[in-house]
Image (spheres, rainbow, N blue to C red):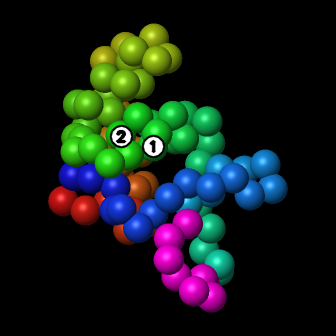
């Protein structure tokens, strides 16, 4: 899977938010805000193919958490991306 190319992270009012590039008169009724962990993962995988194992590895390495917790957190994060329509298979 991969993050859809039309979505980019921008800084707005001190927050990291996901926006769709190139839409004139963008619909801002739905803003997706990223916390520090989500932003770290987004930046690490943007433009690359990824799966749960890759994301879990990033979490385990960066935060020093065990593999089980990293796998659960990675799966939840990917599920949220999918729920928001931000990834493609």
Residue under circle 1?
42
The verdict on residue 23 being magenta is yes
Residue 85 percent across, percent down from the top left: 38, 68
Crowding near the residue tagged with mark 2, few <14, some 14–19, many ≥20 C-alpha atoms within 10 Å: some
The verdict on residue 24 being magenta is yes
The residue sitting at 50% across, 58% down in the picture is 8
Looking at the image, can residue 89 be seen? yes
Left or right: residue 33 versus residue 3 is right
In magenta, the rendered stretch is 19-27
Residue 57 percent across, percent down from the top left: 31, 23
Looking at the image, can residue 83 be seen? no
Residue under circle 2?
45
The residue sitting at 51% across, 34% down in the picture is 40
In what quadrant of the picture does the C terminus appear? bottom left
- Answer with the quarter of the image where residue 37 lies: top right
Please report contact status of discs 1 and 2: CB closer than 8 Å, yes or no. yes
Residue 14 percent across, percent down from the top left: 78, 49
């Amino acid at each position: 899977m991969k993050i859809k190319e039309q979505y980019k992270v921008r800084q707005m009012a001190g927050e990291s938010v996901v926006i769709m590039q190139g839409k004139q008169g963008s619909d801002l009724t739905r803003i997706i805000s990223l916390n520090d962990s989500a932003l770290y993962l987004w930046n690490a995988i943007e433009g690359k193919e990824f799966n749960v194992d890759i994301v879990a590895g990033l979490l385990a390495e960066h935060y020093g958490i065990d593999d089980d917790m990293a796998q659960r957190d990675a799966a939840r994060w990917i599920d949220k991306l999918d729920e928001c329509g931000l990834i493609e298979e």
